[in-house]
Image (cartoon, rainbow, N blue to C red):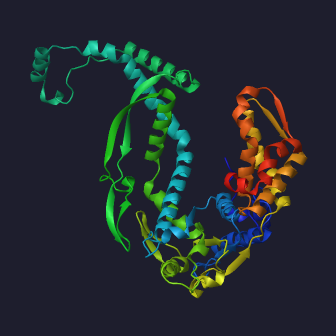
Amino acid sequence: METIIPIESLTPRQIVAELDKYIVGQTKAKRAVAIALRNRYRRQQLPPELRDEILPKNILMIGPTGVGKTEIARRLAMLVRAPFVKVEATKFTEVGYVGRDVDSMVRDLTNIAVRMVEQEKIQEVRPKAQRRAYEKLATLLLNQSERPKRGRRREISPLEMLFQILSQDDEDEEEPPTLAEETPGEKADRRTRRRQIMEQLKSGARDKETIEIEVEESLTPFVQVFSPQGIEEMGLDADLLPPFGPRSRRKRVVTVAEALDIFTQQEARKMIDRSAVVSEAIQRVEQTGIIFLDEIDKIAGSGRAVGPDVSREGVQRDLLPIIEGSTVTTKFGPVRTDHILFIAAGAFHTAKPSDLIPELQGRLPIRVELEPLGAEDFRRILTEPKNALTKQYQQLMATEGVQLEFTDDAIVEIARIAGEVNTRTENIGARRLHTVMERLMEDLSFDAPDHAGERIVIDRAYVQAKLADIVKDTDLSRYIL
């Protein structure tokens, strides 16, 4: 699990260092987002009357695909557990402007924040919830083991049952004599059996046993709302509407281990305050939320055509109030967007940042240009990040008992081929490494179970043998890579 670092302990230099663990190069972009993140902490230290006056400095990243634009924003959000959502700007537009309402990205961000805070709260109460789950499961197992015996003890003829009920005094009506009182010895024996079951559960001795449990499920209601695009359905959180939220109960046969997880989740949800979860989630969205607007160059009108450009400009104008600051109605309540950090990105191959309407350009004051990636960058990407592709393949092959090694000259050759293919065909940046590596590893991945216990070294000659033909044949590489 990723270590969560408090934002107050992260200087811009440390933020860049953390991003360097996963992203190679692009120092300018890293510095820009590091400053934006640190400014959030600085703003929180100011008096309330001044705090609201300081707006986030939204960022526009300009660079070809596959150079790390999305990854920088995503890793930044993960670093401080900030609510984060990536939105393709093109989904808001089609010819005639029949795309989704732009407010939906704020609603999506709020949903993510609520789930994030809920999971954090569940983890906080999990030890106590697990103890309750053990108690519940032990009682259930004990009752099921005693059910045949109880059935014999409860066996009373209908006539005798009716006679006993009619002959009761008024003060005894609430407890019909359907079960004989347990003797002290029976109670002690029951406690002993229950303690034994608890010990078996905690040791995992009964994890694989099956048990029938009753699971409570929420039925999320939907209401129809009117939007500029027509009638849409908006889900309501049933947990926020007690006692109106409809719930269903159904029986499931699961293993004891699965039942323990289900009961732990149920008990944890009972222990957390839903209203507090929603309140904290909205606070996080408003103060630390990050929305990444990708492909923003696709809605930049050139001004030389009509038709689709009208809808593109319409999307830009709809984005203006959201980025500038407005209140969006969500199923959890109103959310203000004044201090949400917007990071827009685009390749801008056919359009220019100046093709955006001036009002939107003003809402994205920080411009950062990302550099295209070359062979040397690819070499570093294959080895330096914590999640480098070579490390991923080594771990995957290790699950089959294969010890995989890449020589230095093999990595240099892979990087060279990826750069050459990008030059000859479409430049898709670091994503080209995925296609090249998958092609290189195809035969080994297929035959890995047959090589269990072996040590396989991938060197420059192996790389050339697998990829040389594709590099030579440009037409073939267009289809395969």
Q: Is residue 318 visible?
A: no
Left or right: where does residue 390 sit relative to residue 104? right
| In front of the other: 458 or 236 | 458
Counting from the top left corner in percent of width and height, residue 363 is at 60, 81
| In front of the other: 223 or 26 | 26
| In front of the other: 97 or 106 | 97
Q: Is residue 349 visible?
A: yes
Left or right: where does residue 148 sit relative to residue 311? left
Left or right: where does residue 121 sit relative to residue 248? right
| In front of the other: 361 or 377 | 377
At 38% from the left edge and 14% from the top edge, which residue is drawn? 186
Counting from the top left corner in percent of width and height, residue 407 is at 88, 43
Counting from the top left corner in percent of width and height, residue 150 is at 30, 16
Instruction: Please say if 421 is above or below 448.
Output: below
Instruction: Please say if 1 is above or below 291.
Output: above
At 62% from the left edge and 81% from the top edge, which residue is drawn? 54
At 42% from the left edge and 23% from the top edge, which residue is drawn? 141
Furthest toward the right, the residue is 409
Instruction: Please say if 441 is above or below 287.
Output: above
Counting from the top left corner in percent of width and height, residue 42 is at 68, 73
At 57% from the left edge and 24% from the top edge, which residue is drawn? 204
Left or right: where does residue 460 sit relative to residue 50? right
